[in-house]
Amino acid sequence: MLYGTMPAPPQWPKEPLAYVEWYSKLKGQAENDHNMYLVTVAQKRANNLPAADIISLSSIRQSCQLVPCFGSEDVSSDWTNDNVLDMCSRSLLNNWASKYAYQTLW
């Protein structure tokens, strides 16, 4: 039998899904220097897995641009576009990325 030819179990959702890794909740106010919100990687769950969920794609309002927070952390030459979010524990939520981001985050 070929893989991928079996139908999905009936209890599985029929809509598109997204895997989301969570960050900390936003504080009441943005950082003073740049008016962007600081977020940190959420603590791992009890089973040492990342704080993540599979959610309905229709529940996502917009994507967010995260900027690595430089300063107190050492920046490694190992950081790349592909792994910087895994390597950096603190990021800034860029509310200046688009007019829509500014209106919804600020």
Image (tube, rainbow, N blue to C red):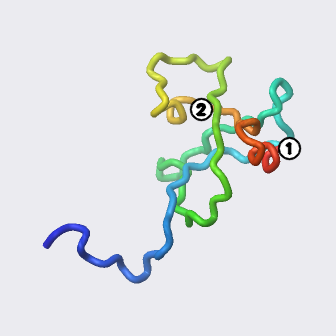
Find the distance from the CA under tag 1 to the CA under tag 2. Answer: 20 Å
- Name the amino acid type tagged 2: Ser
Percent position of residue 32, x then y: 86, 27
Q: Give the mark nearer the N terminus: 1 vs 2.
A: 1
Helix, strand or loop for disc 2: loop
Percent position of residue 81, x then y: 49, 30
Q: Quadrant of residue 75?
A: top right
Does 18 sit left or right of 72 as displayed?
Answer: left
Q: Quadrant of residue 1?
A: bottom left
The residue identified by callout 2 is 89
Relative to 5, residue 10 above or below: below
Question: Is residue 51 or residue 93 the one in the foreground?
Answer: 93
Question: Is residue 89 or residue 31 the one in the foreground?
Answer: 31
Relative to 76, residue 1 above or below: below
What residue is drawn where x is 51% and y is 48%? 50
What residue is drawn where x is 47% and y is 26%? 80
Could you say which disc has been placed on residue 28 in the image? 1
Does 25 sit left or right of 60 as displayed?
Answer: right
